[in-house]
Image (cartoon, coloured by chain):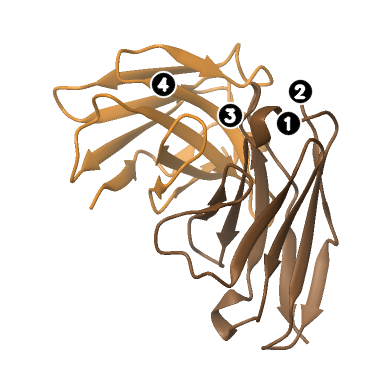
Chain colours: A orange, B brown
Amino acid sequence: QVQLQESGPGLVKPSETLSLTCTVSGGSISNNYWSWIRQPAGKGLEWVGRISASGSTNLNPSLKSRVSMSVDTSKNQFSLSLSSVTAADTAVYYCARGGSYNNYWGQGTLVTVSS
Amino acid sequence: EIVLTQSPGTLSLSPGERATLSCRASQSVSSSYLVWYQQKPGQAPRLLIYGASSRATGIPDRFSGSGSGTDFTLTISRLEPEDFAVYYCQQYGSLPLTFGPGTKVGIK
């Protein structure tokens, strides 16, 4: 059974960079796409972007100038970096398997942007 | 960008009743590349339906999806207590991938 676990700071200061890592267990990160989705409290889901095992990315244009993703196949991990954060970036961030739709999700991690 | 609209915003029903949820797209979703997720409080979304009408692994057959083009429907034939949740549609026919705002199915 594939499992995903997000990790990273729960609190980030405004204008700084949010960095999260997703560790995949129970399966290889190779030969799949991997995604980040976020959800502000009490609101809907927003697609952040996806990355292939080879490192090819597609990012949401609304965030594109601030987002980068990377993959480390040796560690079975992929990562999200979001720069110049504001309070509007406060959300639960999910990592998930799949590039089109997602059948395995992490539990989500709350990231709060506040000074 | 394809904008998805879901209706109603909230549905109040009793266990055993039928639920019909609508998802409308601002432009045609190619190849019916639409999915439905269920989300309960404090949990990650759970994939229910992909390709507009195919049930994901382990999903009970009381859940069914239909539609094409711009109009899609999720039907829950007889609501079980565990079905009360928020349901989201999402299209994967074109980038950026987009989600609908959700329909909350609550207990009447």
Q: Residues within 10 Å of mark 2 (few under 14, many from 20)?
A: few
Q: CA distance from mark 2 to mark 3?
A: 28 Å
The image's mark for residue B29 is 1
State which chain disc 4 sits on: A
Location of mark 4 (residue): A51
State which chain disc 2 sits on: B
Could you say which is closer to the camera, residue B56 or residue A89? B56
Observer-side mark, 4 or 1, equals: 1
* Residue plotted at (82% across, 38% down): B70
Answer left or right for B39 relative to A76: right
Numbered disc 2: secondary structure: loop
Q: Identify the amino acid type marked 4.
A: Ile
The image's mark for residue B73 is none
Could you say which is closer to the camera, residue B26 or residue B69? B69
Q: Position of residue A102 (x, y in %)?
A: 46, 42
Q: CA distance from mark 4 to mark 3?
A: 26 Å
Q: CA distance from mark 1 to mark 3?
A: 37 Å
Q: Residues within 10 Å of mark 4 (few under 14, many from 20)?
A: many
- Asked whether the residues under marks 2 and 3 belong to the same chain, the reply is no
Observer-side mark, 2 or 3, equals: 2
* Residue plotted at (35% across, 38% down): A8
Numbered disc 4: secondary structure: strand
Location of mark 3 (residue): A14
Numbered disc 1: secondary structure: loop
Location of mark 2 (residue): B1
- Asked whether the residues under marks 2 and 1 belong to the same chain, the reply is yes
From this view, report whether residue B8 is shown above or below residue A61: below
Mark 4 or 3, nearer chain start: 3
Mark 2 or 1, nearer chain start: 2
